[in-house]
Amino acid sequence: MPSVYMAAPPVPFVRSRFPVLVRPWCPPFAHGRLATTVARGARCAESVTESVTNPPNLIRFVPAKGRQQPAERLVLAPMASAIGVLRAEASMPGPRDRTTAIDAPVLPPPKAITVAGSDSGAGAGIQADLKTFAALGVYGTSALAAVTAQNTRGVFAIAEVPEEVVAAQIDAVLEDIGADAGKTGMLSSPTIIETVADRLEAWGIDKLVVDPVMVAKGGAQLLQPTAIHALKTKLLPLALVVTPNLAEAEVLSGRAIASLPDARDAAARIAALGPRYVVVKGGHREGAPIDLVFDGIDYVELAAERIETANTHGTGCTFSAAIAAYLARGDDVHEAIHAAKRYVTDALRASYPIGDGHSPVNHFHNVRVAEPSAIAGEDR
């Protein structure tokens, strides 16, 4: 019987059982992209059959652990954020033929990967991350670490994705598409955290934003207590930026936070675990939502207007995703954090109710949606 961790309200944690076969031979991808990986010295995995949640027909090739040297096309360098315009025409159905001008980048946009859980209500998790990336002009890719059944009222079930499949997603995306930055969100178990840390380090993701998700907005526990040690020792040392809220900062630092001096001490303790920048978010604090940014030397207080709204679902995911997006676009860390703070504040201000509980922010508040009639008029 798999382990189950309960939450308030109770959240069933489920794993089904299907055998998975990992072959001892290297797959014949002579003309595929994995041939490059093998050529770089990756070994084939040992043959093992175990009871995990993979479909029975899934066969996976597992590269060697440790740092791989990406091919030249996978160099993770920031790309220019300047976007050119290419005019293209697409026919639209209607009483008469109409064309739409489509803005497309001359060069591929910056890219970012998110490794997190899925939110079926689309307000947080992978869905919020991808919407944030898109709104900020970044091509987003993803690796799902968990699937949740949730809406604006709460989380009702959590199913982990098998570690082998999490690793396969990361390898598949980064081997082909690459990433200029990355972020992690809900990683619920020690083995998943270790797997994600191993693969992100192997692919050299140095612009990594870690959102140490522990509890959902409705109170459901999203991180198993046994996973805290792995988070602190495996993932945080890889982080360029870590973005805990007050409760998460208390867990990571091992101390209570009741004042700004407490937050400063907590940030210093978290920084000692390895991340280069620590952002202790102040949204849960009474009064102004002042975030505290610590770079290992200096403390910077980042203030913003408090938006009175119940539409706050996914703010942490959105904030960390926005930081990753701005890093991918080439901003330095302080610029990325400031810009992400502004983006979230505006997203809260422009939010609207969806469902009966905590609705999400408006990720596309900065995107103008053009009506077909208006576009047709511009093209006349």
Image (cartoon, grey):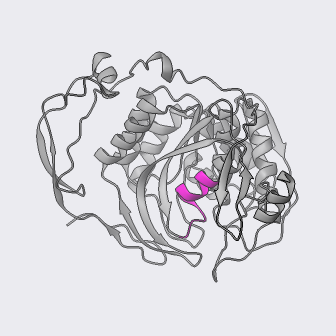
Residue 20, image x and y in percent? 17, 50
Compare residues 171 and 345 and report the one nearer the observer: 171
Quarter of the picture containing the N terminus is bottom left
Q: Main secondary structure of the magenta part?
A: helix
Task: Please tell me whether residue 127 belongs to the stretch shown in magenta.
Answer: yes
Q: Residue furthest bottom?
A: 356
Can residue 260 be seen in this snapshot?
Answer: no
Q: Residue at x 74, y 27 (%)?
A: 297
Residue 154 placed where, x, y %? 54, 76
Q: Is residue 164 above or below residue 92?
A: above
Q: Nearer the viewer, residue 207 or 22?
A: 22
- Residue 78 in view (yes/no): yes
Image position of 326 with respect to 360: above or below: above
The answer to which image quadrant residue 71 occupies is top left
Q: Which residue occupies 49% across, 20% down?
A: 73
Residue 67 position within the rendered picture, expressed as x and y whole percent measured from the top left: 39, 22
How many numbered circles does the render carry? Answer: 0
Q: Nearer the viewer, residue 198 or 131?
A: 131
The answer to whether residue 314 is magenta is no
Residue at the image position 23 percent from the left and 41 percent from the top: 60
The percent position of residue 92, horizontal first and vertical second, equals: 66, 61
Question: Where is 69 relative to 265, above or below?
Answer: above
Q: Residue furthest front?
A: 96
Magenta residues, as a range?
121-131
User: Quick one: 243 or 179, which is closer to the camera?
Assistant: 179
Horizontal side of 77 relative to 159 (left or right) equals right
Q: Quarter-wise, where is residue 217 in the image?
A: bottom right
Quarter of the rendering occupied by the C terminus: bottom right
